[in-house]
Amino acid sequence: MAHHTTEVLVIGSGPGGHSAAFRLADLGKKVTLVEKYSDLGGVCLNVGCIPSKALLHVADVINEVNDASEIGVITDSASVDLDKVKAFKNATVRKLSSGVGLMAKGRNVNVVKGEAQFLTKNSVQIGEDIYDFNECIIAAGSRSVELPFIPNEDLRVWNSTDALSIPFIPKRFLVIGGGIIGLEMATIYEALGSKVTIVEFNEQLIPAADKDLIKVYQRYNAKRFDVRLNSKVTEVIADSHALSVTILNDTQASAEEFDAILVAVGRSPNGHLLSGNAIGLEINAQGFIPVNNKMQTNIPHIYAIGDINGPPMLAHKATHEANIAAEVICDHNVVFDVKTIPSIAYTNPEIAWTGITEKEAKHKGINYEVSVFPWSASGRALGANRSEGKTKLIFAKETGLLLGAGIVGINAGELLGELSLAIEFGVNIEDIALTIHAHPTLSESIGLAAEVGLGTIT
Ligand code: FAD
């Protein structure tokens, strides 16, 4: 058993962990970064954000080719070379993952492969070795939730990691859970040729988003997906030719067959998997490790960032928190204090929102107003044959202060940046309306929605 010492030990190399390690090293700390998997980058880079977006790009290309005849471009319908698709996705991941390794090396971050478990408040065990630290940042992330009544060991029952590896293209594909991950996977497999059914327990897909945005998405996709709302899967029986599934809704139970199932019912934090109890680390019942606005746990020299400290489980939240924790450790006077953490479903069309949603505004009894610019009046959207979208602003009735915004449409995620900035800087809709937006762009819809709010256009 070897004994090592480090100033700061970071557990997990995802967006939270590697960003924290790099910031610490840049600020002059001696850092050890521990990762239990052979590849660096965590969920986001290896089995989350990045491979899903590479495959969603493939889906977009397939859909564009298949819809091209609508605008007078005559082609054969798209066919897929699955090996090449996988190679493209894997190469995208590999470039970024090896980049993380190179950046660690460039900063003299000591990367250790293995699983860290707390021994004391100032040490962890990794395999046969012990590492003593002054400070520790836990960035150990989350994992897919499994449903107990499903034969999870069957090779046709997938979590998001399985689905991203594309074991095969199922003819009949069931997605359990109509949240962001479920819908992104549904988008990919529908484009690859699967007939996709989505079962959602709630009365709405992506329950956190505003219903009017989801309605636009669902109308556009009415022919692509069979969506069952207010429904749940209660039984799955696997036999050699199919998975027999019982789907229950308000009124009846139906028995249906599928060739593969994706379970996308949420993610669970890894808080209970680090022996934290042994050192008195506070971990809540769900497995989250609570922190204050400096990212400190109940043990002040141990920090927790990213998925493991609470929702929303998003990479950009993890990286922001990483910088806070690293800088606090280096005695900078900083706290986590943001007005908004944007959310994006990279579906077709995309659904994106930032700041308060209308349903939250209602729930909190805020005196708000909404203005909408429909993309059916946008020259750019019409010219792209994608006028189904809309841009929506939520602002304080008395002052016009922008409180939130939602966009559904192509590139909605890219358009959202301006609105997050606007919320952080406390602008009102008049500021947005007075900002000249280039014509014809999709971002023009933001300026026009502000003008609708001011009543200068109707
Ligand atoms: P993670 O990325 O989960 O990294 C944690 C790391 O810690 C892992 O590598 C793990 O192996 C390691 N680890 C755990 N325990 C130990 C231990 N004891 N010792 C050593 N190492 C350990 N978010 C977005 O913002 N945008 C997206 O588009 C997006 N798409 C997604 C798509 C999918 C399919 C999934 C599953 C997630 C997606 N997410 C997305 C969420 C995003 O991946 C997470 O929010 C993000 O990865 C969290 O970062 P993290 O640093 O907290 O943890």
Image (tube, rainbow, N blue to C red):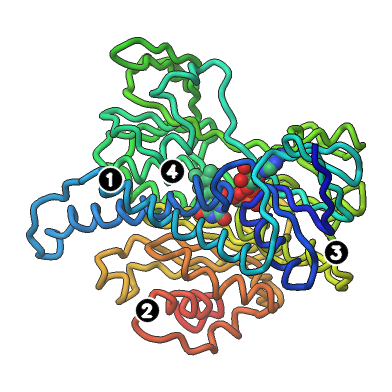
Q: Is residue 34 above or below residue 19?
A: above
Q: Disc 1 marks which amino acid?
A: Ala
Q: Position of residue 178 (x, y in %)?
A: 48, 38
Element at badge 1? helix
Estimate how packed mark 4 is, as few (under 14), some (14 to 19) or many (20 or more) residues with alpha carbons within 10 Å: many
The nearer-to-camera label among 3 and 2 is 3
**Residue where numbered disc 4 is placed:** 183
Q: Which mark is residue 329?
A: 3
Instruction: Tell me whether circle 3 and circle 4 mark residues in contact (CB < 8 Å).
Output: no
The nearer-to-camera label among 2 and 1 is 1
Left or right placement of residue 438 versus residue 26 in this view:
left
Q: Is residue 407 above or below residue 380?
A: above
Label 2 or label 1, whichever comes before in sequence order: 1
Q: Which residue is depicted at the point 55% across and 51% down?
A: 44
Label 1 or label 4, whichever comes before in sequence order: 4
**Residue where numbered disc 1 is placed:** 191
Q: Which residue is depicted at the point 56% across and 68% down?
A: 393
**Label 4 lies in ligand 1 vicinity (Cβ under 8 Å):** no
Foreground of the two, 424 or 378: 424
